[in-house]
Amino acid sequence: MVQHTTPLWRRLQYRFDYLVSRSTTALIGWLTLACLSVVVPASVVLVRAGHQPPATLSGQLTAVWVSVGQTLKIGGAVGSPLYVLASVLLALIALLFVSTLVSLITAGINQRIMELRLGHSRLLETRHTVVLGWSDQVFPVTAELVAANSNQRRAVVAVLAPKDKVEMEQEIDARVPATGTTTIVCRNGCTTDPAVLTRVSPQTAKAVLVLPPGADDGDTHVVKTLLALNAVAAEPGDAIVVAAVHDAHNRVAAQLAAGPRGHVLAVDDIVARLLVQTARQPGLSLVYQELLNFAGDEFYTVDAPALTGRTFGEALLSFTTSSAVGLLRENGTVTLNPNPATEIAPGDRIVVIAKDDDTTVVAAAASGIDEEAIATAGPRAATAERLLLLGWNRRAPLIVQQLATYVSAGTTLDIVALGDHATMRGAQDVAVASQRLDVTLHSADTTDPRVLARLNVPSYDSVIVIGDAGRTPTAATVATQVAEADDRTLVTLLHLRSIEQASGKRISLTTEMTDDRNRLLAPAREGADFIVSGRLTSLLMAQISENPSLADVFDELFDAEGSELYLKPAADYVHPGSETTFATVVASARRRHECAVGYRLRAQAATGPAYGVRINPDKRQQVRFTAEDWVIVLAES
């Protein structure tokens, strides 16, 4: 039998661990013996090595005792045995008291530090912004709030979520490294518990944002959080509450829970509508990205008493560095792209697109109109289209429904996905009821290049790619499903890019993604259309939190019955080839009962960062349009 020899240091370590693991009394005893075994010999050496060591043995022992007493802080008094014993006893009592006091102070400090690290302390701030919940939307929301607060001396954003405080801070710091004048504070806790909500002081905040979780019961969680907010404050404050739900059917309940100052977004409806609009108008996603981002031009409502009594058509050419797009009535109703003959009443505010609210100065731009450059375009004949939808998720039925609303009669839609056939059949029934869209279902894997090759993708007028998790097990987490859906989308885009290069024909492609980081990895051409659902929701929530009146503006903008943004041929407004002012384009659009807010140049469509999109140009600016350029207008159709 082989004999194993354990090293000496291992045996000593084992004995030490054994001693330490025993009772407190035994541990104190062993530590005392260990201490004396070092202190006493060292004291003897000190006494004998001194300049004048005592000559007698009793003197040396007394000196050793004094040295040991001073080293161990037990006095080292010299005198009668009773006096020495009493002094040692008092020293030990004092040592025990001081040690206990130090340990209590240390434990209290450690407990407080742990509470702070756990994020359980209460926030004492006013006019701050509260973000409730944790998802990938936290990062774009935080980044937009930082941009919105860049002109403030000190701003605070408080994030409350059931996640470790330190982890939240580290992730936000990694994704939003430059916070400028904004301080980001994280707190740990359940957002549906009113007692926990007080940690971020929502009753003194200027805005509260409730982020939608990605789980199937996420809408229920949002409603419970909104109810918890109501329970925190006995009386409603002036904080603006902005929430988002996935299913439009849950919006009514969420709106009731949010209260009169609350605004609830139906995310799936908005994303589906933008996907359809962008698929039919390439480049529209870039326009919305510019309008909803605080770094560019965005919507404002401004008071313009100088325009009271005048018409909205006159207001269109009453700003040189802003673009009027609607009216906010005194009763709170919003009308985008009203009839140019609409009179501006006292108390009305003008809805404009501007770089900042201080740039919305009334200054007439009508003098720059070139009447000879204005073109008159007749109505375009409706044509049937061939559309392709790759992938399937909960928004797919809404996409089919929106397509059935917008397309012309005779349009065909091929759906290729690994989704549930019963659900997909339901979407087909919706299309059949519209009598304008013919839907064909194909059960196939969109990441298989052979499937895409058989479809002849370049022959379609428009292609929409949405997240499809494939045959993901039902036990998979939401994060896993989202990641798999984006991964499959990236693979599908890679094959479509290969098909586009091989055919030499440009594919009109619109892609939906969940994680904005994956958009940067997408193998798509420059300036391609991407609708990132999480980022879109974050931008809308941040905009409303900073300007509550924009909630009604966005409701009107994303309502299928109202005016929407379109990219229309520039030749429909001005004669191509000659230079003209943008004021001329605005005047031409006014005759068509439209609001021109910008343009996109085809020659710059592949050049970042704007990709040819120019929102709210100076109306005095000279522009040379070609027949391939577009004008961005707000119109009913």
Image (spheres, grey):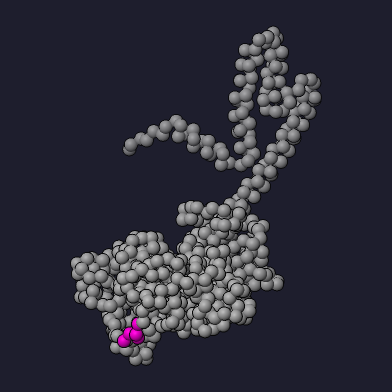
Decide: is 321 above or below 1: below
Q: Nearer the viewer, residue 451 or 107?
A: 451
- Residue in the picture at 66% in, 43% down: 106
Give residue 187's quadrant in the image. bottom right
- Of residues 438 and 443, the one nearer the viewer is 438
Q: Is residue 332 left or right of residue 138?
A: right
Classify residue 201 by image quadrant.
Answer: bottom right
Q: Position of residue 456 (x, y in %)?
A: 21, 75
Confirm whether residue 629 shows in the render.
Answer: yes
Image point 60% across, 78% down: which residue? Answer: 308
Quarter of the picture holding the C terminus:
bottom left
Query: Residue 547 or 17: which is nearer the viewer?
Result: 547
In terms of secondary structure, what is the magenta stretch mainly?
loop
Q: What residue lies at 60% left-to-right and 66% top-to-bottom?
A: 207
**Percent coordinates x, y for residue 118 in the rendering:** 58, 54
The residue depicted at 52 percent of the width and 84 percent of the height is 341
Where is residue 256, by image quadrant? bottom right
Q: Is residue 340 left or right of residue 309?
A: left
Front-lying residue, 232 or 49: 232
Which quadrant holds the N terminus?
top left
Q: Position of residue 219 (x, y in %)?
A: 51, 74
Q: Position of residue 91 (x, y in %)?
A: 74, 31
Region of the chain picked out in magenta, as a range? 377-381
Is residue 142 found left or right of 592 in the rendered image? right
